[in-house]
Image: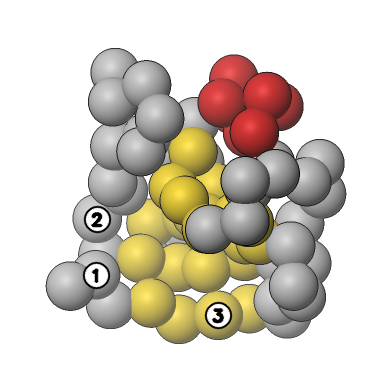
Amino acid sequence: MMARRMSGGKVAYVDKIPNCDFCKLKHAKYDAKTVHGPWANMCPDCFNMYALGKTGLGYGQELRLEGE
């Protein structure tokens, strides 16, 4: 499991950036709620198609590597 540290509800600092749960081709930039209900790790393209469109409490976080 990835270790996470939250910062203000819009950014999650992780040890490793996962792949996108939708396309599986790119690294995820977001962990966010989808229009289908469940949450997913998403690259920017998939975030634009499947996420609720913003980050923050109840919507999702931008993923950043610890130390950035």
Q: Is residue 4 above or below residue 46?
A: below
Quarter of the image where one finds residue 58: bottom right
Q: Which residue is mark 1?
A: 2
Q: Quadrant of the N terminus?
A: bottom left
Residue depicted at x 38% and y 56%: 65
Percent position (x, y) of residue 8?
73, 80
Q: Who comes first in sequence, dot 2 or dot 1?
A: 1
In the image: residue 5, left or right of residue 15 = right
33 to the left or right of 67:
right
Residue where numbered disc 3 is placed? 6
The answer to whether any part of residue 62 appears in the image is no
Disc 2 to disc 1, C-alpha distance = 7 Å
Q: Picture quarter containing residue 56?
A: bottom right
Q: Residue beneath label 2, please?
A: 16
Task: Please state which amino acid type lies under the numbered disc 2.
Answer: Lys
First-in-chain label (3 vs 2)? 3
Residue 5 visible within the image: yes
The x and y percentages for residue 68 are: 47, 57
Total marks placed: 3
Determine contact: label 3, label 1, CB under 8 Å.
no
